[in-house]
Image: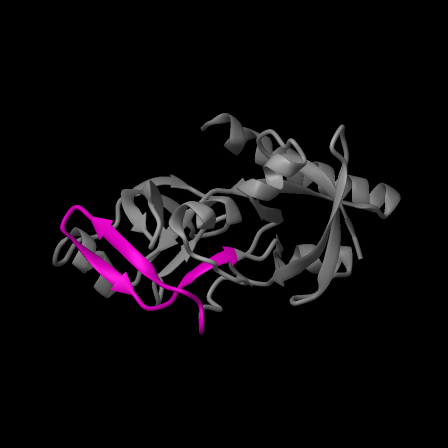
Amino acid sequence: MDKAELQRPVQLAVAEAVFRRTGRIFVPVASSARHVHLCRADVERLFGAGYQLQKFRDLSQPGQFACKEQVTVVGPKGKLERVRVLGPERKATQVEIAFTDSFSLGIRPPVRMSGKTAGTPGCTLVGPNGQIDIPEGVIVAARHLHLSAAQAALFGLRDGQTVRLVSAGDRAAVFENVIVRAGDGHDMEVHIDTDEANAVAMSGSTMMEVLK
């Protein structure tokens, strides 16, 4: 068990204890680096017929995991190498990057929730067994707060609600438009991208306050 796995149960227990004592909502926040979700057909096109994604490590959200596999993302201007694939497989292939990445690629993706890829730009993905051109699917992920149904009920929050996230410290800031994702398959954690984490000098996983 690594340091992050040991830290997470403590953060969840602290968040619940602080809320019950003070009514204030503090949640763990993690920086989400660029990554790719693949559908079954695209797994086979990139890695070979019948290929199965190999787990590298579990992620904080139930059933989600980082894979050993990596691909190259290619745009009109440049490319990003060794971009991690996340599992399990999705119904549609999707690439999540930060705005800094978009400048390197020459792609201007919109800010979207995961899975909302209609009308987004595409790119080329290169794997060890081939390459594919996806017509759409490149997004900058909207900042969001994962909560289980029980956690959402405890905090008085609901799926789809928009909240604010307060970061303290030398580069204190308030993140607006944080979307709550609550229900089965979710567990308490805010996800922001690397640009947002760097803007507030965030190091590793930390706790920030949520305002309704």
Q: Is residue 210 magenta?
A: no
Q: Is residue 119 magenta?
A: yes
Quadrant location, the C terminus: bottom right
Left of 177 or right of it: where is 120?
left
Residue lying farthest right? 22
Left of 163 or right of it: where is 193?
left
Quadrant location, the N terminus: top left
Where 155 falls versus 209 (above or below)? below
Residue lying farthest bottom? 118
Q: Position of residue 113 (x, y in %)?
A: 54, 63
- Nearest the eye: 11 or 161: 161
Query: In the image, what residue occupies the spot 58% across and 30% down?
Result: 7
Location of residue 18 by image quarter: top right
Query: In the image, what residue occupies the spot 77% across and 35% down?
Result: 168
Q: What colouring does the structure picture have?
A: one colour
Query: In the image, what residue occupies the spot 50% across and 48% down?
Result: 98
Query: In the image, what residue occupies the spot 83% across and 46% down?
Result: 24
- Nearest the eye: 83 or 25: 83
Left of 50 or right of it: where is 210?
right
- Nearest the eye: 116 or 138: 138
Q: Position of residue 2 (x, y in %)?
A: 46, 27
Q: Position of residue 191 (x, y in %)?
A: 58, 48
Which segment is the magenta one? Answer: 118-140
Residue lying farthest front? 77
* Image label count: 0
